[in-house]
Image (cartoon, rainbow, N blue to C red):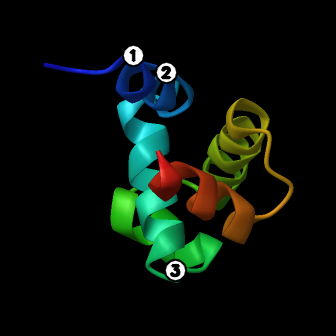
Amino acid sequence: FHRDEDKTSKDVTASLSAREEQVLQCLASGYQYKEIADELNIGTETVRTYIRRIYEKLHARSAAEAVAKYYRH
């Protein structure tokens, strides 16, 4: 039995790709961009691109806001 609220609260985070979720989890752990890049074997600019997309999808203006919105859902 799932209430409708459960589904709608997942809609925002469901729009993130698996890679974007990985980047966001690293941000939540306090990683710097360079550390995220090293952890995921991608370039720092690629990290910036992912973070920009995450901010857009979650309607966030900062890492802290993005992480808060992600974990609230």
Question: Residue at image x 39%, y 51%?
Answer: 22
For label 3, the residue is 31
Q: Is residue 45 above or below residue 16?
A: below
Tell me if label 1 and label 2 are in contact, CB under 8 Å. yes
Q: Secondary structure at mark 3?
A: loop
Q: Nearer the viewer, residue 27 or 59?
A: 59
Q: Is residue 48 above or below residue 54?
A: below
Q: Is residue 23 left or right of residue 4?
A: right
Q: Nearer the viewer, residue 33 or 28?
A: 28
Which residue sits furthest left?
1
Which mark is in front, 1 or 2?
1
Crowd tier of the residue under label 1, counting other residues whose Cα lies within 10 Å: few below 14, some 14–19, many 20 or above: few
Which mark is in front, 1 or 3?
1
Asked whether the viewer can see residue 65, the reply is yes
Question: Residue at image x 42%, y 62%?
Answer: 25
What label does residue 14 carry, if any?
none
What label does residue 8 carry, if any?
2
Residue type at numbered disc 3: Tyr
Cα distance in 3D space between marks 2 and 3: 29 Å
Residue 10: x %, y % from top left: 43, 29
Which mark is in front, 2 or 3?
2
Residue 17: x %, y % from top left: 44, 28
**Which quadrant of the figure contains the N terminus?**
top left
Residue 39: x %, y % from top left: 36, 68
